[in-house]
């Protein structure tokens, strides 16, 4: 086999170095280089995905050290999905960043590093390697959140860093326990060795608990979600779009990998308590995430709490642990990335055009920005789960899986979650389309508490960037195109999701075997 | 009880460090102290890993070496983890410099006060 898996990780890192080096000579050259690197990576990811959806995963041995001793890259259906998703979303968000984003070369270098970390997490077959990529992703994400001007983004980034580090450290401790129990770090080898040690061994149980809790922090499951609203709301619009679409998504993928590739379904069957913890995390996240979303007045904070609730669905699907639910989890991960990333970018576009950043400021928005309002409407309805959008298909599979697995309380909560999602999106849609615009655009700035007030100014200043010519209507074609593409994708993916589910079947059967 | 403490002394110390680190991160108002807490927390995990490197009665796979044998793998892993920890500390301190420049204070309370006064 060729070197494609290694290239997939190496390309963005190489691009990032080139951006930094060129930046020494000429500033503001980051964008074109990032686009080239991202486009090549997308092509590589798609080529690799074609091979990976077969009967056997693509395996790549790094540096010639064979599997249990060296590091291995494994690309099966799930990893390929994530790699393609990361590459495509990163390329799409770049189209938006051209006008909206921070423009320094350092920003684009960090951007590519984040992409490298996420791709690495998706395709690695070694748990310690996964920890390293988890931290690369984290470091890049902290730096990106802080790339906004003003104190709020720096504070959000520091909070994210402190909480994220605890999560990653617990993950590392979990790896330590697994290593003590088995003496290996390769995922495939670990799953065999853990079975030999015995699933009821305290060491194995502790390892599972620490790994899961560490990833819960990164996914932002309810009690450990607190970094997420601050980070998403404090970051520049481009960055919230990118990290809301990818960072938690890949962490959730990592949870699927840990639970099913390393510990396997037999572990869940042997430890009823492990499943209970997963279900509890899912249910609490779904319900409380939605309730907290309803109480938010700032759009980006509301979207962040909505993510807490949506990832509850994915964790629920992992707890159910049957083929249907897992297919649903993967579809929902992809769909959520497109929808939530799109919503964040749309809210940035709307703020750029009209200055509206709060729920109240969205009144009568349809008159002021038809494209922004239309995209927000489509994406919000997709998120609620109106067929044929992708949000519906994902939830449908997960709910079906829960019913098949006889997890009745979870099934009820998943079905109710649609109503909960409607609770926070309907009031915005009603304001956009069925109310007269009351105040001028200035209303956006006055109607927020002190903390968010400073953010409103900050974020607007960010969006305009260093370019003095741009006025509040500084919305480029690229930004509009990206937002519309996200809205269209959310619907188109829904139509093709059933075929994707069938494509995924061999991989998932192998995972559950 | 005493046997347990003597047997597992290294593990207990590692977890004591974890506790101290977590407490400092949550309890301290000062941002720099929070970062110090984070470092102590990570060091606890590093030490835990290094203790696991000692395998009673173990021997290296290739050479016949003198007892006691210490596995090199955890050391290599922790070397990587230390590099990650250093990078994290650098980013955190960079952020704190920016926060200080913006608000002129290093404590959470002070920052809240500055925001309230605005």
Image: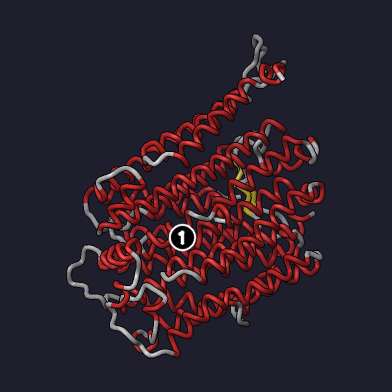
Q: Circle 1 is placed at which residue position?
A: A229
Chain letter of disc 1 in the image: A
Q: Which residue lies at the image location 29% right of the left edge and 80% below the top edge?
A: A441
Q: Say which quarter of the image contains residue A223.
A: bottom right
| Figure colour scheme | secondary structure
Q: Position of residue A404 (x, y in %)?
A: 80, 68
Q: Is residue A467 left or right of residue B52?
A: left
Q: Nearer the viewer, residue A76 or A243?
A: A243
Q: Nearer the viewer, residue A286 or A448?
A: A448
**Height in image: A271 above or below A249?**
above
Question: Can I make out residue B80 in this image?
Answer: no
Q: How many labels, in total? A: 1
Q: Is residue A18 left or right of residue A72?
A: left
Q: Position of residue A438 (x, y in %)?
A: 34, 86
Q: Is residue A162 left or right of residue A148?
A: right
Q: Secondary structure at mark 1?
A: helix
**Height in image: A296 above or below A137?**
below
Q: Nearer the viewer, residue B107 or B7?
A: B107
Label 1: few (<14), some (14–19) or many (≥20) C-alpha neighbours in 10 Å = many
Q: Which residue lies at the image location 77% right of the left edge and 55% below the top edge?
A: A512
Question: Can I make out residue B31 in this image?
Answer: yes
């Amino acid at each position: 086999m060729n070197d494609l898996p290694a290239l997939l990780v190496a390309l963005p890192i190489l691009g990032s170095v080139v951006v930094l080096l060129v930046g020494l000579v000429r500033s503001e050259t980051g964008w074109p280089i990032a686009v080239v690197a991202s486009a090549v990576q997308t092509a590589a990811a798609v080529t690799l995905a074609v091979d990976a959806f077969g009967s056997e995963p693509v395996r790549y041995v790094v540096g010639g050290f064979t599997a249990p001793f060296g590091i291995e890259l494994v690309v099966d259906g799930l990893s390929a999905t994530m790699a393609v998703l990361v590459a495509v979303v990163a390329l799409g968000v770049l189209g938006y960043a051209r006008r909206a984003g921070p423009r320094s070369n350092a920003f684009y270098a960090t951007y590519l590093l984040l992409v490298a970390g996420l791709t690495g997490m998706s395709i690695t077959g070694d748990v310690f390697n996964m920890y390293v990529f988890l931290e690369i992703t984290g470091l890049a994400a902290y730096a990106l959140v802080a790339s906004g001007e003003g104190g709020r983004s720096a504070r959000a980034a520091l909070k994210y860093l402190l909480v994220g580090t605890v999560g990653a450290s617990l993950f590392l401790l979990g790896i330590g326990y697994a290593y003590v129990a088995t003496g290996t770090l390769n995922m495939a080898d670990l799953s065999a060795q853990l079975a030999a040690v015995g699933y009821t061994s305290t060491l194995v149980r502790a390892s599972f608990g620490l790994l899961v809790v560490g990833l819960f922090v990164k996914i932002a499951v309810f009690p450990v979600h607190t970094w997420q609203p601050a980070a998403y709301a404090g970051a520049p619009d481009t960055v919230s779009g990118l990290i809301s679409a990818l960072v938690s998504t890949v962490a959730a993928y990592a949870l699927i990998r840990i639970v099913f590739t390393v510990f396997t379904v037999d572990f869940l069957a042997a430890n009823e308590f492990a499943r209970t913890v997963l279900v509890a995390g899912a249910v609490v996240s779904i319900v409380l995430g939605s309730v907290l979303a309803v109480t938010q007045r700032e759009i980006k904070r509301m979207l962040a709490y909505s993510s807490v609730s949506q990832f509850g669905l994915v964790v629920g699907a992992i707890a159910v642990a049957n083929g249907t639910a897992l297919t649903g989890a993967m579809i929902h991960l992809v769909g959520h990335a497109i929808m939530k990333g799109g919503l964040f970018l749309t809210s940035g576009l709307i703020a750029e055009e009209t200055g509206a950043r709060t729920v109240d400021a969205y009144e009568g928005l349809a008159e002021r920005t038809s494209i922004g309002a239309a995209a927000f409407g489509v994406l919000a309805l997709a998120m609620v789960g109106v067929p044929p959008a992708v949000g519906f298909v994902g939830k449908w599979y997960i709910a079906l899986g829960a019913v098949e697995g006889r997890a009745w309380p979870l099934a009820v909560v998943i079905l109710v979650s649609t109503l909960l999602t409607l609770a926070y999106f309907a009031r915005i849609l009603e304001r956009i389309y069925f109310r007269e615009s009351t105040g001028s655009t200035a209303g956006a700035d006055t109607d927020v508490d002190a903390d968010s007030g400073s953010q409103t100014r900050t974020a607007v200043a960010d969006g305009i960037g260093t370019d003095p010519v741009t006025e509040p209507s500084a919305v480029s074609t690229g930004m509009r195109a990206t937002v519309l593409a996200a809205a269209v994708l959310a619907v188109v993916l829904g139509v093709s999701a059933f075929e994707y589910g069938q494509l995924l079947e061999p991989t998932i059967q192998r995972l559950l075997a | 009880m005493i046997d347990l403490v003597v047997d597992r002394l290294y593990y207990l110390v590692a977890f004591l460090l974890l506790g101290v680190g977590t407490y400092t991160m949550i309890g301290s108002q000062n941002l720099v102290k929070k970062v110090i807490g984070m470092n102590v927390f990570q060091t606890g995990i590093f030490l835990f890993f290094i203790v696991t490197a000692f395998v009673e009665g173990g021997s290296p796979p290739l050479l016949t070496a003198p007892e006691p044998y210490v596995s090199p793998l955890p050391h290599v892993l922790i070397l990587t983890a230390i590099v990650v920890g250093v990078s994290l500390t650098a980013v955190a301190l960079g952020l704190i410099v920016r926060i200080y420049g913006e608000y002129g204070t290093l404590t959470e309370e002070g920052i809240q006060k500055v925001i309230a006064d605005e």
